[in-house]
Amino acid sequence: MFVIALDDINIVLRDYHIDAECFSFTELQRYHYEEDNPDSREVRLIVKAELKDGRSLVIRFKNEEDAPQDVIEAQSRFAALLLANGIETPKAYASEGVFTRAYSINGYDVVVTVEDFKDGEIRTVDLQTAEDTGKLLARMHSIAEANDCHVDCKVLFDPLAPNDLFFYESFKKRKERLLLIDSSLYNRIVQQHDELMSHIAPLGEEMRYAVQGDISDCNLYRTEDGRIGIFDFNRCGDNSLFFDAVMQAVFISRLMDYPEEMDARREDIIFSSFLKGYQQIRSFTEEQKEAFPYLYALITAFWGDDMKWVDNSCTKSVDEADDNAVRQWMEDILKREMTMCPLT
């Protein structure tokens, strides 16, 4: 297992021309790659370092197949560009003109970055927070576009590729069993899926720009003066700005914590508030507005929780041969595919 000591951190600090010494550190996040593969040399360790001058820094140690040093450098440069253009995000430290350095620590090769630590992590989203976050994302998009900024890395929320919000592939993979349960219903679902994609795919030809890629409860914070900031550019890459806006809005409205007093319409209200804020800064084109109902139907029809994660999910019901439950899921999926919600 990858381990570090105070001496390792202080070597990093000196390399980044930070004079103060670290006297203690705590782990903020660790991926245990060795649990699945004892011989793995992959690393993701994020620590909070406490310095004798009173500062707190975040130091990231990474060795991941999909994040070589040039990608991490590009992600860091994008974050620095946002900061320079007024976006609230932690200051990243540079060493000899670059934000990343390579080290060999206790037999592990890692890439290191250093940035300021920020308090005020946001976990609960109300209407104002959703609207403010939408404005924040729009400003980030405008900065990326104006500066022609790009990061060559896959993103989490690209509807034209496997993504972390909806799982059509998991449904299609079980084609043989689904055809046996109800071939007509299965074929209608696939046909409607292809129809939805035909309305979305043309927007994949739009220019793609760098996006942070993962606005979530772990990656937002509020400053003492009330501004919303963003950190963690680990999933930063190039995406259609329209795709990113819609799919981040879905994430914000479905996968975070919300005030207990919000009613059953919470999801719709949070979603609309986010996009309201976004469109106050950036307007969608007519083509994007026309494509929106099809994209939203696609996300909703094959929503990740329903497809894979809940105990009675569609794919688990298939795998457990619960044909009645599967047929009900298929009917629900088709209904969702057919429900066109306009952009408000």
Image: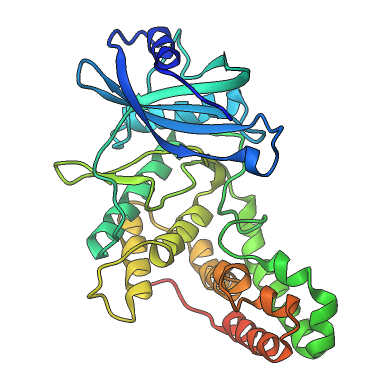
Q: Nearer the viewer, residue 203 or 106?
A: 106
| Picture residue at 69% right of the left edge, 36% below the top | 38
On the image, the x and y values in percent for residue 112 come to: 50, 22
On the image, the x and y values in percent for residue 226 come to: 17, 46
| Picture residue at 32% right of the left edge, 53% below the top | 133
Judge whether 66 appears above or below 123 on screen.
above
Position of the N terminus, as image quadrant, is top right
Determine whether, in the image, residue 161 is placed left or right of residue 5: right
Judge whether 134 appears above or below 1 on screen.
below
Q: How many marks?
A: 0
Judge whether 186 appears above or below 275 on screen.
below
Q: Nearer the viewer, residue 334 or 199?
A: 334
| Picture residue at 32% right of the left edge, 47% below the top | 136
Taking the image as drawn, is residue 218 in sight?
yes
Q: Quadrant of residue 56?
A: top left
On the image, the x and y values in percent for residue 290 come to: 53, 69
Taking the image as drawn, is residue 149 in sight?
no
Determine whether, in the image, residue 193 is placed left or right of residue 141: right
Judge whether 33 appears above or below 177 on screen.
above
